[in-house]
Image (spheres, coloured by chain):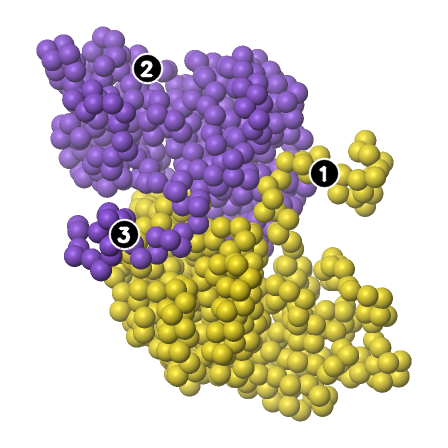
Chain colours: A yellow, B purple
Amino acid sequence: MTAPGSQPAQQGARSLDPHLSRYAARTAGMTASEIRALFAVASRPEVVSLAGGMPYLAALPLDALSADIGRLVATEGLTALQYGSAQGMPELREQICEVMALEGIRAHPDDVVVTVGSQMGLDMVTRVFCDPGDVVLAEAPSYVGALGTFSAYQAQVVHVEMDDAGLVPEALRAALAAVAASGRRVKFLYTIPNFQNPAGVTLSVQRRTEVLEICAQHDVLVVEDNPYGLLGFDGQTYPALRSVEADNVVYLGSFSKTFAPGLRVGWVLAPHAVREKLVLAAESATLCPPAFTQAVVTRYLTQHDWKGQIKTYQEAYRERRDATLSAMEQHLPSGCTWTKPDGGFYVWLTVPEGLDTKAMLPRAVTQRVAYVPGTAFYADSFGSRQMRLSYCYPTPERIREGVRRLAAVLEGEMELLSTFGTVHRRNLSGPQTPTPDTA
Amino acid sequence: MTAPGSQPAQQGARSLDPHLSRYAARTAGMTASEIRALFAVASRPEVVSLAGGMPYLAALPLDALSADIGRLVATEGLTALQYGSAQGMPELREQICEVMALEGIRAHPDDVVVTVGSQMGLDMVTRVFCDPGDVVLAEAPSYVGALGTFSAYQAQVVHVEMDDAGLVPEALRAALAAVAASGRRVKFLYTIPNFQNPAGVTLSVQRRTEVLEICAQHDVLVVEDNPYGLLGFDGQTYPALRSVEADNVVYLGSFSKTFAPGLRVGWVLAPHAVREKLVLAAESATLCPPAFTQAVVTRYLTQHDWKGQIKTYQEAYRERRDATLSAMEQHLPSGCTWTKPDGGFYVWLTVPEGLDTKAMLPRAVTQRVAYVPGTAFYADSFGSRQMRLSYCYPTPERIREGVRRLAAVLEGEMELLSTFGTVHRRNLSGPQTPTPDTA
């Protein structure tokens, strides 16, 4: 859309914004994520979306929840609908400690801060620790929402290599040395040790101690983001980094995947002095988290078989993981490789050299399958040969159909490649400029 | 609490925090607000709290809400408990436009961003506009939570004088000139035009145009915070600044006072280009606002007589305002002056010279009455002769008792003053250092 403007023409399209000169410098780092644009695509019923990370809520007992939440309003409405404290409700913080105990964490409710999803936890931790130009280490690839938060605080992300056993300790040492040599300062390592988003891999138990030791040696804080830890497909749980080392780990948790994301109830567990800063930061950010959604979670944990519900989720996701991997095995062309998650929501797929997952996305959507291109999960320009496939939401049957469609798209792209030597003409004309999301 | 530390003794008490050297510079501006510490005091049943701004939720029809929210979970649970969009649900944004129409605002739902209370709206607006060192103009006094947010972004607050007709235009011009002369840049004027928190005064209709013109002339954005606008005691509404001028006003709204604060549903209405930035900022802050609380508000606005509920609130608060003012008239010692709110939650009281409202707070709490000292509402050290009295929550009878107790405290202080020439010895020994909150 262009408009005949009162603005000088030489300023170009952006001159249409009269507030342009007013924005804070940090807005330069706020750009639309590829996942965000994909929400629209994912909602079209004919498209099999392997893009979004929406939990399979059909597994929830809605009728029982309905009755229970109704009772909550009738009997505790005056507190559940009122302002609460910035730190979150004491009873919920006690329950959160019980949840974390399942992964070996011993914590005091006083060191827990309830947040509006663990995304807000990330935002608060970054606010408290990162000045512009500070470095955050993150796995390569890493959670797109975390990259967005770091960017909003003008922190610089340095990626650290992973393999099938998670973060590679040697790569971590090398990254720390490289950042130190560049004269910058690492504020923390951001890691998703379990069933990582987007890679689907898990940090081995042996490496956990090693990663903690390396960070302690280099005086670098560890931020452990653990939304999927209780969703291991064999019921296995790994010891949280926080369970091994309490003083140097800030832990982020969430009820989004073990209960429901629409409540936006997450938390941060932090060393006491850090917790004090986080509460002040949270108070200026939202005053207090919603008392109502906290009360709903508290009641759910009290009245319902929440451990049984987690088992139900595990089974649903295991079935979907199995459908995904067997369909990939059966249909994907040779030259593709992928991770084998034993929990969580995601498979990370690498396509043959010469293909570009972002460039081929419009073709995939035309063929009624969606995914998230790998570039979304890197702060730099890597990931063009990767994509994230989410198996959490569709039925196994739809997943199989989606993988079949994806295989057809990949085969079509490979055919173009072998015929013409290239798939996407623009790749020939030098470095790609950022483009608007293509769907 | 002191501990025999491994830390060098010369670093003092703060050395107990091993993370001290890691924090971002902005944490220096994050300090505990006086209101926050008072939440604890306010909860003791024997204290009449005229401190907190908690709405009188007993006026809500909890049984009807209970049934309705129960139905919501049963019939729409799969969407209400799922992730939503960062901007907020379309249906709610349409309803928000209808609510704003009551104050003369014509807006498109696409320019509305749903936030976790209007506090998050404030946080997002500050994030998008303020670099460290930028100036925000705010009324003197102003909302304590806004001052906290500005401080967290290292923005500097310059206060602008008010009188009984709100912000004084001449003072606004003078402040703009003074900031320009100091070489700093004003990013926006933050104003609460209706039933201001904490002063209880309202910007006159004539001044609204004048304030907008002055800001336009000086190329300064206006941030209009309007949580109380529909709570005029004679059913009167004032034209929103946004209704007069659309392009240069960012409007903050909230359901906390017209429905319930425990849901934390607020919104920002902004010019289109600004709205785009706000959505990106919000996405990195919380991913999306809770779908569940949005669905509750949407259903409430659809199924309940929400305008009737606002009338009920108006009547409850008018009765309490009347009880407050008549008790003040009857009991407070001469030399006290106060504002006469015709809506909202607050009276702003000025006590006789020589008294210090912050220093006398512990004595007031001992005599079982609580308020917020005036200094909380200034970014500088003003307000020591003022206090905010909130009449929104207690019954009229309790309010009268609270004012009686407060009058006794003030008389005791004045007696000390006339006998000894001073009440608080430490005021004699030079500038006061910040003290921990005294209750």
Crowding near the residue tagged with mark 1, few <14, some 14–19, many ≥20 C-alpha atoms within 10 Å: few
Tell me what residue is drawn at x 76 percent, y 72 percent: A360
User: Depth check: A274 or B271 in front?
Assistant: A274
In the rendered image, the residue lying farthest to the left is: B419
N-term mark: 3 or 2? 3
Q: Amino acid at mark 1?
A: Asp
Q: Secondary structure at mark 3?
A: helix
Tell me what residue is drawn at x 29 percent, y 19 percent: B385
Q: Amino acid at mark 2?
A: Trp
- Residue receiving disc 3: B15
The answer to which quarter of the image holds residue A52 is bottom right
Q: Is residue A265 left or right of residue B208?
A: left
Residue B309 x/y as whole percent: 43, 34
Spatial separation of the CA atoms under disc 3 and disc 1: 48 Å
Spatial separation of the CA atoms under disc 3 and disc 2: 45 Å
In the rendered image, the residue lying farthest to the right is: A420
Crowding near the residue tagged with mark 3, few <14, some 14–19, many ≥20 C-alpha atoms within 10 Å: some
